């Protein structure tokens, strides 16, 4: 019953945000880099932050440093959705927020290089998550997949408050209702992609630090493969990797190949779920087998990814 009430509250809050976005013209206009053709409300992903905020209040202010970092990230990302802020401001907030997450995770009590690794991973994944938010439903489907995997593991070993994950999932479902459709009512915006990435990374970091098992990073394998190989290709072509583009595999498939974009989004989530369920099973095996599995999986995914992407580029781009 509690979850039903929270879902209804989040649904109402999303509708209220739509009125605010419409009133203040917070919209996403299509351009040559876009995968959509109609003006759409931007920032609907603010519901991810609001879901976490409700949990924070209801829990008696649990994980305060994490939530402060999440708030800073969400606010600066929302402002960037509206005004396009300076890169220096965004980088400063990102750096500060990662430090707050690190403090919440007690990383400062560990060797110094843990903090360096955390900073590189968190900033890298957040930016990748942001760049991957390019077609209807992909952020919702993929986040539901990762969130579900974390909840399954959490049910077994309780590494984080389950309601934080549950409320976040409810927020994703609300967003999916308005975004997972042929003509989306809203897009996540930077505020959405950054907020959900920050939440999921906090949960994933908590899991990895508790278990000491890096194999759980494979919960982000699908996004990781697409993001990393896209960056490598853009560097090879001497493109500015920080500029907007349409060169991810899902964009080639959805735009140039003309595949159903909702199906593409759904498949990204399903593939990650399948991989994640296998990872959960493999996590109980010895370390040597885990490394063998991880390397084999990433190599296999990379080969499959490159074959499909090369085919899409040759057939639909360089024709």
Image: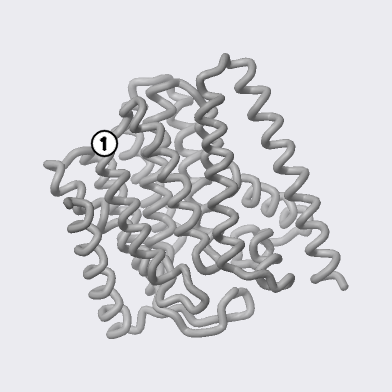
Above or below — where is 32 with respect to 140?
below
Please provide percent x and percent y for residue 32: 63, 79
Query: Coloured how?
Result: one colour
Q: Which of 43 and 121 is in front in this view?
A: 43
For image coordinates 42% across by 66% down, the residue present is 188
Position of residue 15 in the picture relative to residue 81 (left or right): left
Position of residue 188 in the picture relative to residue 64 (left or right): right
Residue that extends furthest to the front in the rendered view of this protein: 1
Position of residue 142 in the picture relative to residue 200 (left or right): right
Above or below — where is 242 with respect to 114?
below
Position of residue 92 in the picture relative to residue 266 (left or right): left
Please provide percent x and percent y for residue 115: 43, 30
Above or below — where is 117 with respect to 245?
above
Please provide percent x and percent y for residue 16: 23, 75
Residue that extends furthest to the right in the rendered view of this protein: 319
For image coordinates 30% across by 53% down, the residue present is 72
Q: What element carries label 1?
A: loop
For image coordinates 59% across by 60% down, the residue present is 242
Residue where numbered disc 1 is placed = 161
């Amino acid at each position: 019953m509690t979850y039903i009430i929270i879902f209804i509250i989040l649904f109402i809050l999303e509708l209220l945000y739509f009125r605010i976005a419409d009133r203040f013209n917070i919209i996403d206009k299509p351009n040559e880099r876009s995968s959509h053709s109609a003006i759409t409300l931007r920032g609907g992903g603010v519901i991810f932050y609001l879901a976490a905020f409700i949990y924070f209040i209801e829990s008696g202010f649990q994980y305060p440093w994490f939530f402060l970092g999440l708030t800073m990230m969400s606010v600066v990302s929302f402002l960037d959705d509206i005004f396009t802020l300076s890169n220096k401001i965004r980088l400063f907030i990102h750096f500060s927020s990662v430090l707050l997450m690190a403090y919440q995770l007690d990383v400062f009590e560990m060797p110094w290089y843990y903090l360096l690794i955390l900073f590189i991973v968190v900033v890298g994944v957040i930016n990748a998550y942001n760049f991957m938010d390019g077609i209807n439903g992909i952020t919702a489907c993929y986040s539901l997949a990762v969130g579900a995997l974390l909840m399954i593991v959490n049910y077994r070993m309780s590494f984080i408050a389950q309601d934080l994950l549950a409320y976040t999932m409810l927020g994703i479902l609300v967003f999916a209702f308005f975004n997972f459709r042929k003509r989306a009512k809203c897009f996540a915006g930077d505020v959405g992609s950054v907020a959900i990435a920050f939440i999921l990374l906090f949960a994933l970091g908590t899991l990895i630090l508790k278990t000491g098992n890096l194999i759980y990073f494979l919960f982000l394998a699908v996004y990781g493969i697409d993001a990393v190989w896209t960056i490598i290709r853009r560097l090879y072509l001497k493109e500015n990797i920080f500029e907007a583009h349409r060169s991810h595999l899902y964009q080639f498939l959805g735009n140039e190949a003309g595949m159903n974009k909702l199906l593409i989004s759904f498949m990204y989530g399903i593939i990650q779920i399948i991989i994640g369920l296998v990872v959960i099973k493999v996590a109980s095996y010895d370390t040597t087998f885990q490394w063998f599995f991880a390397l084999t999986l990433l190599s296999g995914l990379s080969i499959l990814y490159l074959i499909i992407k090369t085919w899409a580029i040759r057939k639909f781009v360089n024709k």
